Amino acid sequence: MTQDELEKWIRQLIKEDKLYKFYKCSEWRQLSEAVMKENNYECQYCKKRGFHTKARSVHHVQWVRKHPRLALSRTYEYRGATCSNLIPLCEDCHNKEHGKGKGMKKGNENRFMNEERW
Ligand SMILES: [Zn+2]
Ligand SMILES: [Zn+2]
């Protein structure tokens, strides 16, 4: 799949409210599993703070919804630097990254969780 095709596919999924399909696809599963393994299945944010917590899911620094082209990209470019796009996180850190609980309505929250399937 080219980046153009990927972007088109994800935009379509978002439109149909079926982004979960992306998280089920074999490309993502293989990629996220590889990223998890490379990081010893540890939450990288907890690790920075000196804790060892088991990661539960791989977070997209550049959110899939905003940057569909980067959905299967390990890195992204920012001001000439190459940054990690995929980071294993525990549930708590992942929730924080997505601002869960920060003024989000209950209904939205559940919907969001189901869609991202973390
Ligand atoms: Zn964590
Ligand atoms: Zn995430």
Image (spheres, rainbow, N blue to C red):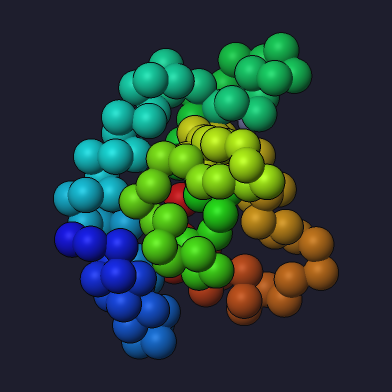
Q: Is residue 28 left or right of residue 69?
A: left
Q: Residue at x 55, y 69 (%)?
A: 66
- Residue 81 in percent (x, y) is at 61, 37
Q: Residue furthest bottom?
A: 15
* 96 relative position to 10: left or right: right
Q: Above or below — where is 61 with respect to 19?
A: above
Question: Which residue is at a point 28% across and 49% down the rendered structure image?
Answer: 28
Query: Residue at point 74% right, 71% down?
Result: 104
Lateral position of residue 37 relative to residue 57, left or right: left
**Depth check: 112 or 44 in front?**
44
Residue 95, placed above or below residue 54: below
Where's residue 115, x and y in %? 44, 67
Considering every residue shown, the one lying at the far right of the view is: 103
Residue 110, percent from left and from top: 56, 69
Quarter of the image with the N terminus in it: bottom left
Q: Visible in this render: residue 18?
A: no
Left or right? Give the position of 116 relative to 80: left
Q: Quadrant of residue 101?
A: bottom right
Classify residue 53 by image quadrant: top right
In this rendering, does residue 102 appear at all?
A: yes
Find the residue positioned furthest to the front: 80
Looking at the image, which residue is at 39% across and 47% down?
73
**Number of marks in the image?**
0
The image shows residue 33 at horizontal and vertical percentages of 30, 33
